[in-house]
Amino acid sequence: MFRVPLLIALTLIIAFGGGILSSLSALNASVGFGAIRIGVWSAFPAAQTAEADPYAKAHRAKAGRLLYGSAEGLTFTASADDAGQRLTGTCTYRLSGRTPTARLWTLYAADGDGLPLVASADLPTSLNSQTVLRQHDGTFSVTISPTAKAGNWLALPDTGAFSLVLTLLDTPAAGSTGLIGLDMPGIETLGCGNE
């Protein structure tokens, strides 16, 4: 007597639950299609355009973020060093080299949700192209560490995995023709723990 309604209820729970979980996992898996990768850095130039795929639009709506237009800027993220090892807050890293041509760029460490990590209110948790110290040839080097370092230093909380977010503003790299021959800075692990 209760067998048929119980089977129907169980089927509906599995169908709706499975559908919701698969939709959430698809939204959390990626910003969308059309990613570009340059070394360990990745960006989604089509995510902020009207031609963005449905996953990119849903991801943008779920995050509640206003993204840059294609002529305004491009955001690159890196969650591993040049050797392919995951970035963690217990290690020290050196980001060095050049960025693609841009009027301004910003750099900060972010958690898994893309929110900036804050080590302490009085420590440098972000850098930009106007404040970074450069060598004579225009290259720069930034130490990313939970402990203070001389020169360009980005403070990290002693936490788990994180990613670096490099945003290029007013850059030709944001256009479809500017993606060829981009130079991105390298990320080198200097040591972990007490090394």
Image (cartoon, rainbow, N blue to C red):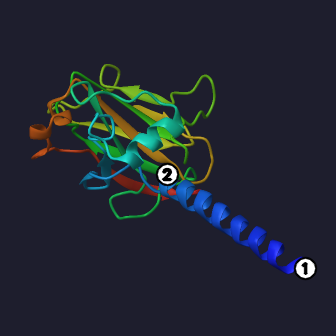
What amino acid is labelled 2 in the image? Leu
As drawn, which residue projects farthest toward the right? 1
Label 2 to label 1: alpha-carbon separation: 41 Å
Q: Nearer the viewer, residue 169 or 159?
A: 169
Q: Quadrant of residue 11?
A: bottom right
Q: How many marks?
A: 2
As drawn, which residue projects farthest toward the front? 1
Q: Residue at x 26, y 39 (%)?
A: 51
Q: Nearer the viewer, residue 131 or 46?
A: 46
Q: Is residue 166 visible?
A: yes
114 on left or right of 137: right
The x, y position of residue 143, in whole percent, is 42, 41
Q: Residue at x 51, y 53 (%)?
A: 28
The x, y position of residue 105, in whole percent, is 30, 27
156 on left or right of 71: right
The x, y position of residue 21, in whole percent, is 61, 60
Q: Residue at x 43, y 49 (%)?
A: 93
Q: Is residue 150 visible?
A: no
156 on left or right of 69: right
Q: Residues within 10 Å of mark 2 (few under 14, many from 20)?
A: many
> Depth-wise, is mark 2 or mark 1 nearer the camera?
1
Q: Nearer the viewer, residue 114 or 53?
A: 53
User: Is 107 placed above or below 185 here?
Assistant: above
37 on left or right of 54: left
Q: Which mark is residue 1?
A: 1
User: Is 18 placed above or below 146 here?
Assistant: below
| Quadrant position of the N terminus in the picture | bottom right
Q: Which mark is residue 27?
A: 2
